[in-house]
Image (cartoon, rainbow, N blue to C red):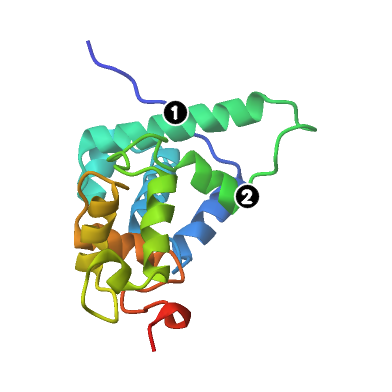
Amino acid sequence: MSRTAISLHLAPSEQALLETILRRRSIPEFQKERVQIVLAAATGLQNKEIAKQYQLEENRVGVWRKRWGIAHQQWHASDQNLRPPLSESLVLQWLADKPGRGRKDDFTPEQKLKVASLCQEHPEQHGFPVTHWSAERLAQAAVQRGIVATISDRTVHRILKKTTCRPTEAAVGSMPK
């Protein structure tokens, strides 16, 4: 028993919007790939043909064809006065990964904040005979203080990268003179 793929039909304005998105340089490749799948499916191509044309896996083509089809049908079925206008952001929302995908964060926002706030203190307060923090020393201090059980210096660096504090910055106002 073979399954039938969702049939996609695009209005000329919808197709023009998708083609505009496809030409943008600021759109990541994975999103362009998904837009290409939708455009190809709207021309009547089967998943197998689309997969061969763009060198993709057939089930991947089916996933994005189905997600687009369902979202597009729901959008068309909703009240025209209440639904949002079809825009680039709406299209990219339809073609986005589902939430909850990927690895979960190991640290809570509070733990990250506490690790980042350590760089505002002087390293000597934590028993390090140096004047500036390194990511490795901040990781050691975070474990010593009990903020986290374990943390790598690379993770500390990623946390600090998202804040204004850098591991080489010491709290200048609290430095001994």
Q: Identify residue type, mark 1.
A: Ser
Residue closer to the observer: 5 or 132: 132
Secondary structure beneath disc 2?
A: loop
Which quarter of the figure has residue 118?
A: bottom left
Asked if 87 appears above or below 125 in the picture, the reply is above
Quarter occupied by the N terminus: top left
- Residue 145 image point, x, y percent: 29, 52
- Residue 119 image point, x, y percent: 37, 68
Neighbours of disc 2 within 10 Å: few (<14), some (14-19), many (20+): few
In this view, the mark in front (2 or 1): 2
Disc number placed over residue 87 in the picture, else none = 2
Q: Residue reaching furthest bottom?
A: 177
Which quarter of the figure has residue 104?
A: top left
Secondary structure beneath disc 1?
A: loop
Answer with mark 2 or mark 1, whichever residue precedes in sequence: 1
Q: Identify residue type, mark 2.
A: Ser
Asked if 155 appears above or below 167 in the picture, the reply is above
Quarter occupied by the C terminus: bottom left
The residue that label 1 is drawn on is: 7
Give me the residue at 27% from left, 40% from top. Answer: 103
Counting the numbered discs, the total is 2
Asked if 26 appears above or below 177 in the picture, the reply is above
Give me the residue at 34% from left, 58% from top. Answer: 29
- Residue 57 image point, x, y percent: 20, 40
